[in-house]
Each structure stands twice: as C-alpha cells, then as structure tokens.
Image (cartoon, grey):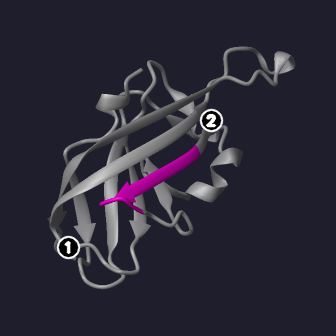
Amino acid sequence: MFDELMLPDQADLVGPTMGGTAAVGLRLPWYRSLPLSCVEAVAISIDDDTVDGEGMTISVGDAEHPVADLGGLAEVEWFVLDRATVRFTRPDGLQPGMHSVALTLTLRIPYAEPEYWPIDFTQTAEHSRTVEFLGKDS
C-alpha cells in the first residue's frame, strides 16, 4: 500500500571497511501505528546480495531491539510518523556510494480484540531503489 514511502534514498554507513555496519532508515508501510510484535520479518538485499538477518537490529524511538526478538515486543509502539533504523553487518563490507537496496517488511495486522485472535492478515511491503550510503564519522 505505502511501499514506495518505506525506504529513503539515503542511508548511513558506519565503518565502510571489511565487516562494516550499515544502517537503513525505514518508515512503516501502513496507515496506522503498530506494536513491534506485529513485525514478522525484515529482509534486506544490497546489490542483489541478501543481508544475513543474524545480528540485525531495529531502533524505534530511543531503544534498539534484535529483529529476532520483535515477536515479544507488544508494548513497544512503532508510530506511523516515526522512522525506524535497521542496522546490519556485511562480512564483505560496504563502500560509500550508490547501491541497489531491496527491502521486504512483513507485518501482521491486528484488527480485532485479543479474545478474537488469531486472525491472520499479513501485509508484505516490498520496495527497491538505489540508495546512497553515506560515510559516517565514528
């Protein structure tokens, strides 16, 4: 629905040498806020190379959470106007400059009170664009 708004055209790159960490900002591709427990999957590929999800984190507000732990974060709200940051490491590094980035965010959308759960309605947002990774001072 809002896939094209999800991924900005610039991203941070921390330590662009071997094993460097990169950070991609993203917006919630939905029309209302959701708890982080509704994020079922985050997948990123850069220049057609899939990023390993192990160690991937997402920051919303002032807190950073492992993507693997999102299912238990029903009390942490991702507000629709807030930008989240996904951080990941690439063993082969990532140099500053233009890169093709594809992002898939799978959301479980809750539309009923808990006594009526589970209702399975999943929204998968996919978007690809060229992103400029900017070097960042440590």
Q: Quadrant of the N terminus?
A: top left
C-alpha distance separating marks 1 and 2: 33 Å
Q: Is residue 40 visible?
A: yes
Q: Quadrant of the C terminus?
A: bottom left
Q: Is residue 83 visible?
A: no
For badge 2, the amino acid type reads: Cys
Q: Residue 95's mark?
A: 1
Q: Main secondary structure of the magenta part?
A: strand
Between disc 1 and disc 2, whose residue precedes? 2
Give me the residue at 45% from left, 30% from top: 79
> Which residue reaches farthest front?
48
Identify residue for label 2.
Answer: 38
For badge 1, the amino acid type reads: Gln
- List x then y, in percent, for residue 69: 65, 55
In this rendering, the answer to whether 91 lies above or below 21 is: below
In this rendering, the answer to whether 30 lies above or below 82 is: above
| In-front residue for pair 24/106 | 106
In this rendering, the answer to whether 7 lies above or below 110 is: below
* Nearer mark to the viewer, of 1 and 2: 1
Give me the residue at 30% from left, 30% from top: 5
- List x then y, in percent, for residue 76: 58, 40
Magenta highlight range: 41-49
Give me the residue at 58% from left, 46% from top: 41
- List x then y, in percent, for residue 97: 13, 64
Q: Is 46 within the magenta?
A: yes
Q: Quadrant of residue 20?
A: bottom left
